């Protein structure tokens, strides 16, 4: 059986992510969903902690997929690209293929001998974590962009209020950080 790796921050897990996971599971027997930058939370770029992201992903996927087909594993950053692949390997079951559109991720895993395939993109102009976070902050409609269970969790944990509070109080606004390339 082939096992694949799909890395993302999932801030939050949205309908584009759900589409990608379903498509990737058509190619592999099992999928490891690696939550990158797992140690970060309570910032505009990373408002949700690892446990909240695991909860969101599992809640969305369990509603539609066989939970025996995927793993959700948080991976904290090591801030050293030379050892990052080994670091990821130390947190995950073995995998044979990596799905990514990130050029650095592709280079690092290719150099380590892994097969790389691009992740499918689905309505990227609509399903973008940065834009969803901006909508939440602006009190715009955002719930239709994430699985229903994810919207419920965000509201249950006060994630919408958290995001607005981060921007209003302790967060120093950095326009470079808040752009559509930071999903």
Image: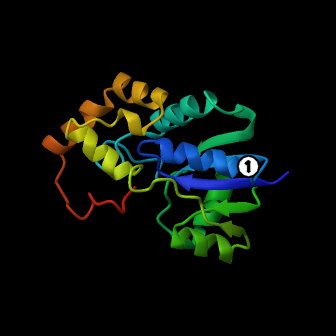
Q: Write down the quadrant of residue 124 in the picture.
A: bottom left
- Front residue of this view, candidates 6 and 40: 6
Q: Position of residue 170 (x, y in %)?
A: 17, 44
Any part of residue 169 in sight: no
* Colouring scheme applied when the structure was drawn: rainbow
Q: Residue furthest top?
A: 156
Q: Residue at x 58, y 58 (%)?
A: 120
Q: Write down the quadrant of residue 178 in the picture.
A: bottom left
- Front residue of this view, candidates 166 and 56: 56
Q: Residue at x 34, y 42 (%)?
A: 47
Q: Write down the quadrant of residue 73 in the picture.
A: top right
Secondary structure at badge 1 equals: loop
Q: Quadrant of the C terminus?
A: bottom left
- The residue at which mark 1 appears reads as 26
Q: Position of residue 103 (x, y in %)?
A: 52, 73
Residue 58, compared with residue 129, is above or below; it is above
Left or right of 147, for residue 136: left
Left or right of 144, for residue 100: right
Q: Position of residue 121 (x, y in %)?
A: 53, 58
Residue 6, compared with residue 136, is above or below; it is below
Q: Position of residue 78 (x, y in %)?
A: 50, 61
Q: Residue at x 33, y 45 (%)?
A: 132
Any part of residue 158 in sight: yes
Left or right of 97, for residue 57: left
């Amino acid at each position: 059986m082939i096992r694949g790796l799909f890395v993302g921050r999932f801030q939050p897990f949205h309908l584009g992510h759900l589409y990608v996971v379903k498509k990737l599971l058509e190619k592999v027997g099992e999928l490891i969903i690696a939550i990158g930058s797992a140690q970060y939370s309570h910032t505009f770029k990373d408002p949700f902690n690892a446990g909240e992201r695991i909860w969101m992903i599992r809640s969305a996927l369990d509603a539609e997929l066989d939970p025996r087909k995927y793993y959700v594993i948080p991976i904290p950053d090591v801030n050293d690209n030379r050892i990052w692949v080994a670091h990821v390997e130390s947190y995950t079951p073995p995998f044979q293929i990596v799905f990514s559109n990130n050029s650095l991720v592709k280079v690092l895993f290719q150099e380590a001998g892994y097969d790389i395939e691009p992740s499918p993109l689905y309505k990227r102009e609509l399903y973008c974590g940065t834009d969803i976070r901006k909508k939440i902050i602006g009190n715009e409609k955002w719930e239709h962009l994430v699985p229903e269970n994810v919207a419920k969790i965000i509201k249950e944990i006060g994630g919408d209020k958290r995001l607005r509070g981060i921007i209003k109080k302790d967060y120093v606004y950095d326009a470079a950080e808040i752009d559509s390339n930071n999903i």
